[in-house]
Image (tube, grey):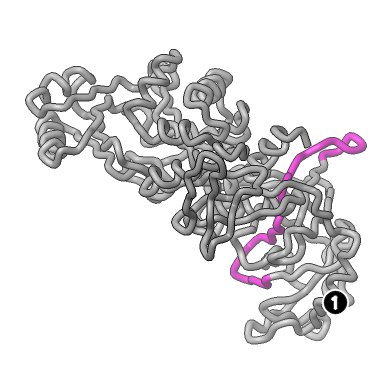
Amino acid sequence: MLQNKVILGSEEWCSFPELGIPTIKARVDSGAKTSAMHALNIAPFIKNDANWVKFDINPIQNNIKTVIHCEAPLVDKRIVKSSSGFREHRYVIQTSLKIGDTKWPIEMTLTNRDSMGFRMLLGREAMSGRVLVDPEQKYLLGQPTAESLKELYQNSEKAKTGLRIGLLASNPELYSNKRIMEAGEMRGHEMHFLNIKECYMKLDAKKPEIHYRGGTILNEFDAIIPRIRPSITFYGCALTRQFEALKVFVLNSATAITQSRDKLYSLQLLLNSGIDIPTTGFANSPLDTDNLIKMVGGSPLIVKLLEGTQGKGVVLAETKKAAESVINAFKSLNANILVQEFIKEANGKDIRCFVIDGKVVAAIQREAMPGEFRANIHLGGTASVIKVTAEEKKIAIKAAKAMDLKVAGVDIIRSSKGPLLLEVNSSPGLEGIEGATNKDVAGEMIRAIEKNFKL
């Protein structure tokens, strides 16, 4: 029995003949129950009265120009908790796995593995009764050379026919930024990461310019995607405004980003558009504290710093005395704050709708950790797929339009009064929403740029 089993190392190359994948590197992991394959643009469909799913894959790590279009019978759809802690609905397919000279059918889930080191994870269910693993070894069944990989995938190379797009941001290693760069390159565009702090401007009536480290002039871009940290909003928006002056298409304008960062002004804009928010109070003097608390329905209540982001500077005051202490403490520091009613029935949950070019392209429910009321993913909140109502979609689209944002993360809370808008984010993160929904949100951002150029 032992001699009939295939001996594998901790990493091996395998193939999927039925999917048209001649070779792919897999992480062999007996600690993982199910197998998983990297997939983008996942979409179920009907074929010969049966359920199938189609998807795209970049089979070679760090090579997003090589794309294989696959389809396979759909076996199931399951909730899987990823290694990063996200609960995601994943499609499950069945296909044939070939390792060395051995071939057998396996089930595997489809998920975005861009943040992982391997495009393929081989779990113990697929190996049971057939495989022995020697974790100290690698590539016991051989590995392809760079030349043979190029030959195997020579018909899968996508030609570059696109635009010159700059991603104006701070951290090239951030998941969201990496995904946007990859999505643009996959669609044939020339992508450039532009570090905000390394850009500088020449203000001139006849020949305005933007320079980059070493003196490179950045005037020849077709489009710019601003992803500006709150801490550098002023300078990032100044650069975005300069690109706009050079007639470069920007995915979110400097004006839209600036007003979205001003919590008070953004709420006023939303209310002017007829969008409901939790009852909110704003005052300058600590002498008005008592009436301010009454104005929003008393305790418990939320106190928010106008400059806070990602859940920072947001405090839940459970009693009137606690509310007075927090408000007066912030006021003594000359901090501008909002006081907002606490929606108890939301139970630490909110909805993030990702709006691109006037459409809700993806939505998740974020749930706070036990004992926490803020549902932000950065604070340990979990993300799961949710079906938003027509009214919630309408609010999200209306909010993005009110803020004049082509790309927006719109946060909505469900209350006994109906859906209420919490906040509109001009640089929403992609990791939580792509991980939970398996949707190529970064690709949708690139498509919005292409639509502007009628590609």
Residue at the image point whose x is 80% and y is 45% from the top = 54
Q: Relative to residue 201, is residue 44 drawn left or right?
A: right
Residue at the image point whose x is 89% and y is 62% from the top = 17
Instruction: Characterize the local packing of mark 1: few (<14), some (14-19) or many (20 or more) Cα atoms within 10 angstroms.
Output: few
Q: What x and y, as percent, mark residue 179? A: 61, 53
Residue at the far left: name it: 287
Up the image or down, 369 lies above or below 117; here it is above
Element type where label 1 sits in the image: helix
Q: What x and y, as percent, mark residue 14? A: 80, 71
Residue at the far front: name it: 206
Q: Relative to residue 382, is residue 62 drawn left or right?
A: right
Q: What x and y, as percent, mark residue 96? A: 85, 61
Q: Amino acid at mark 1?
A: Glu
Residue numbers of the magenta segment? 27-51
Is 372 magenta? The answer is no
Q: Quadrant of the C terminus?
A: top right
Q: What x and y, as percent, mark residue 176? A: 55, 51
Up the image or down, 104 lies above or below 181; here it is below
Front residue (pair 355, 200):
200
Instruction: State the residue position of label 1.
Output: 147
Is 28 magenta? The answer is yes
Up the image or down, 40 lies above or below 392; here it is below
Q: Quadrant of the N terminus?
A: bottom right
